[in-house]
Image (cartoon, coloured by chain):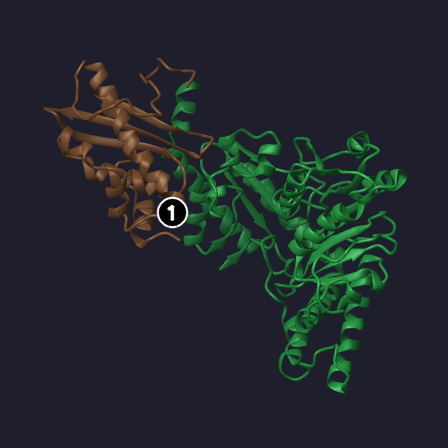
Chain colours: A brown, B green
Amino acid sequence: MYSEKVMECFMNPQNVGEIENADGVGTVGNPRCGDIMKIYLKIEDNTIKDVKFKTFGCGAAIATSTMMTQMVKGKSIEEALKINNEAVAEALDGLPPVKMHCSCLAEEALQAALWNYAQKNQLSIEGLNPPPNYVAEEKGSTEEN
Amino acid sequence: MIYLDHAATTPVKPPVLEAMLPYFTEYYGNPSSVYKLAQRNKKTLDDARAVVARHLGAEPKEIFFTSGGTEADNWAIKGIAAALKEKGNHIITTNIEHHAVLHPCQHLEKLGFDVTYLEVDGDGLVTPEQVEQAIRAETILISIMYANNEIGTIMPIAEIGTVARAHGVVFHTDAVQAVGHLPIDVKAENIDLLSLSGHKFYGPKGIGALYVRRGVKLPSFLHGGGQERGKRPGTENVPGIVGLATAIDLAYQDLAVKTARIKTLRDYLIDRIFERIPYCRLNGHRHQRLANNVNFSFDFVEGESLLLLLDIEGIAASSGSACTSGSLDPSHVLLALGLPHEQAHGSIRFTLGEDNTQAELDLVLDKLPVFVERMRSMSPLYEDFVQKNS
């Protein structure tokens, strides 16, 4: 049911983990739909120097997390914002229709982390809107979530 | 490959296949025709019907062959609704039935029927008292599964049968997971209608049967020729029927011995998963469950990802996680037990068969803890849990 590329990204996930004192953290999704994605960003000079993820979800969710983080690493914020869910899905040689929402989640998770970065630094980033599934998150401050 | 998905389907046993084969090429006659080739097959059908009836404690005339369990369930539920709609419009079932029962019930609701979905307890059981309390003057049908396909919980069918009979309500049971695995006596258990499917006990796919107790008026679901005494038209699937009868006969041979062996393996797997993997939950009743069913939720991980990892190791299992079935909702059965969504998404079902060995389970027990640990290390839910508890 999955492409070889998806299985490869699922079996050998890249950029898994956390970043201490991350510049931006974003979590999207909820247990109801079965996918939760959390993205950590290290940003220097408007460039995504490092990115890590933690994902609760199916094979497609893990694979899209891997692919998306690989695609945005080293990119400027503006360039990273241009990477949408279709680009992630395409880079994976496609996803089954029922799994396309996983690629949306990857895009939203990135935006949530960037939004968090912008909020913390009181920046206004063009083209960046508060993501729909945004969960405000500061380590240790949102125990209830 | 280590096949641990026998509740999904089973391989056809060689003697079953052997019994079926001549009916494709040699004895291909249509049982409704008059010549010898055809009449021979009429006798074959009678014999097969008698075999199925004998194993259920029924009479041959009470067995009607169908295309499988889904057709049998649909026929029983929609048929009784149509036959008794003047008497009443109320149906009682449970919230953990197979979709082949739930969806016909939902369809009937759209037509004006009133359906009570009894809520199971945390082990997946309903009580006869619950059933009795739900019965009204207008109740026309009680449909409760014999054993659940996901969690293996076995319902108190005989006790529910007693309640149904006392109130004069028709009682149907979807016994697709039970026939060939549990001793069944439709008369002693006061069952009026019972659905079964051949491929769940080493028979072929595409063949099943509905037992209809003599005296229960069930109109035809299909309309056509006079096969199955006019109740179920369509040229009989003779090879399938032969396969079904052979398979049910083999299934009930030494059933107690086979069941004891599989139960030992089941408990071996359950006990060691508990020993080796923290934060997990056995879904379904610990003892009142099918001898071959093991269903676990592993906290903080999602089921499909575990299935993919197991599959790469050649281990075939199944998940209550909906991701595998093309819908995003988690299992309605696990939600009905009261599991939160994340646990309902994190379930794995192993269903054992006659050929599985302890060595195979040992391999599963080697791999599974590693895979669960690996997925937990990637899980934001596990990260939150560790932080809260550190």
Image quadrant in which you'd find residue B390:
top left
The picture places residue B369, in percent across and down from the top left corner, at 46, 41
**In the depicted structure, whether residue B286 falls above or below residue B72:** above
Residue with the mark numbered 1: A97
The picture places residue A7, in percent across and down from the top left corner, at 34, 50
Residue nearest the viewer, comparing B274 with B284: B284
Residue nearest the viewer, comparing A74 with B172: B172
**In the depicted structure, whether residue A5 falls above or below residue A32:** below
> What is the three-letter code of the residue carrying label 1?
Pro
Asked whether, in this view, residue B334 is left or right of residue A113, the answer is: right
Image quadrant in which you'd find residue B154:
top right
Q: Secondary structure at mark 1?
A: helix
The picture places residue B208, in percent across and down from the top left corner, at 69, 61
Residue nearest the viewer, comparing B328 with B334: B328
**Which residue is painted at 61% across and 52% down in the image?**
B7
The picture places residue B234, in percent across and down from the top left corner, at 69, 68
**Which residue is painted at 75% across and 69% down in the image?**
B227
The outermost residue toward the right is B166
Asked whether, in this view, residue B105 is left or right of residue A82, the answer is: right
Does residue A8 show up? yes
Query: How many numbered marks have been drawn onto this rendered protein structure?
Result: 1
**Which residue is painted at 22% across and 15% down in the image?**
A120
| Chain containing mark 1 | A
The outermost residue toward the left is A45
Q: Residues within 10 Å of mark 1 (few under 14, many from 20)?
A: few
Asked whether, in this view, residue B62 is left or right of residue B374, the answer is: right
Does residue B282 show up? no
**Which residue is painted at 81% across and 40% down in the image?**
B160
Which quadrant of the figure contains the C terminus of chain A?
top left
